[in-house]
Image (cartoon, helix red, strand yellow):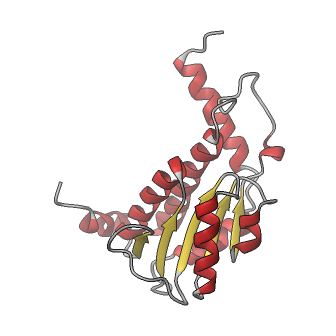
C-alpha cells in the first residue's frame, strides 16, 4: 500500500497530538516552572540515547539561548553534577541502560532527575525525582496505518520534539519579544 507524503504527514501529526494529549498538564506546568529563566539559576544536564538524545540536545540549546547554564553529559566541557543541579533524561522505554545508570548517579550526587518517559511502568520512573509520561495505551489508534509500526520509538521521538518546543513556547509566550531578542543575542555567531 502506498501512502502519499501529505497522508503520511497527517498520520504523524495525529499520532503526536493524540500522544501528547495523554500528558498530565499539572506535571508539564511544574516542569515549565522549573525552567523559568527568572527563577533559580540551577544548572541543567541532559542525557538520552539515539534520536531522543538529539532532540534533548536541541532543547538544551534553546534553554541556553534563554540564559540557562546547560551541559550535555559526555562532552569534554561537562562539569561534575552537584546538589541543586537537574539532570533531564528521556527514554521511550524507561529502561535504557546508560540513562538508568546516569539517573542513579545523579541522584547519588544529590541532583534532581527529570525523566520524560514513554510509559509510567519502567525502572526509570522509580529513580526519577520528577516524571512526565506519555501514555501510548491511552492515545488510541486513529488511523489504520501507524507511522510508528515497526519503527522503534518513532512516535515517542516525534512527540518528545513537539513537547520540548511547546514547553519553550509556553515559557516565553508572555514575553516573546524580549525573549526573542535575548535568545538572538545568545545565538551562535561562529557559524
x, y (%) of residue 98? 58, 63
Quadrant where the image shows the C terminus: bottom left
Is 34 situated above or below 23? below
Is 131 situated above or below 20? below
Tell me: 159 left or right of 36: right
Q: Give 150 or 183, whichever is nearer the viewer.
A: 150
Is 131 situated above or below 105? above
x, y (%) of residue 102? 57, 71
Residue 112 visible in the snapshot: no
Q: Give 94 or 147, whichever is nearer the viewer.
A: 94
Q: Which residue lies furthest to the top in this view?
A: 1
Number of numbered tags placed on the structure image: 0
Q: Residue at x 60, y 59 (%)?
A: 90
Tell me: 127 left or right of 168: right
Q: Which residue is drawn at 52% across and 74% down?
A: 35
Q: Quarter of the image holding residue 88?
A: bottom right
Q: Quarter of the image holding residue 18?
A: top right
Quadrant where the image shows the N terminus: top right
x, y (%) of residue 40? 49, 87
Q: Quarter of the image holding residue 170?
A: bottom right
Residue 70 visible in the snapshot: yes
Is 180 situated above or below 33? above
Q: Which residue is drawn at 72% across and 22% down?
A: 145
Tell me: 9 left or right of 175: right
x, y (%) of residue 72? 42, 67
Amino acid at each position: 500500500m502506498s501512502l502519499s507524503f501529505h497522508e503520511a504527514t497527517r498520520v504523524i501529526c495525529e499520532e503526536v497530538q493524540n500522544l501528547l494529549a495523554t500528558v498530565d498538564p499539572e506535571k508539564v506546568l511544574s516542569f515549565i516552572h522549573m525552567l523559568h529563566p527568572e527563577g533559580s539559576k540551577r544548572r541543567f544536564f541532559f542525557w538520552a540515547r539515539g534520536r531522543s538524545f538529539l532532540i534533548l540536545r536541541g532543547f538544551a540549546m534553546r534553554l541556553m539561548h534563554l540564559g540557562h547554564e546547560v551541559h550535555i553529559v559526555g562532552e569534554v566541557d561537562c562539569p561534575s553534577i552537584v546538589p541543586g543541579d537537574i539532570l533531564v533524561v528521556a527514554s521511550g522505554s524507561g529502561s535504557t541502560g546508560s540513562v538508568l545508570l546516569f539517573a542513579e548517579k545523579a541522584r547519588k550526587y544529590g541532583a534532581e532527575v527529570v525523566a520524560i518517559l514513554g510509559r509510567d511502568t519502567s525502572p526509570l520512573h522509580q529513580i526519577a525525582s520528577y516524571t512526565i509520561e506519555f501514555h501510548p495505551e491511552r492515545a488510541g489508534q486513529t488511523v489504520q496505518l501507524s507511522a510508528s509500526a515497526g519503527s522503534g520509538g518513532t512516535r515517542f521521538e516525534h512527540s518528545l520534539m513537539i513537547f520540548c518546543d511547546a514547553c519553550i513556547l509556553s515559557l516565553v509566550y508572555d514575553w516573546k519579544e524580549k525573549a526573542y531578542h535575548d535568545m538572538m543575542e545568545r545565538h551562535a555567531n561562529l557559524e
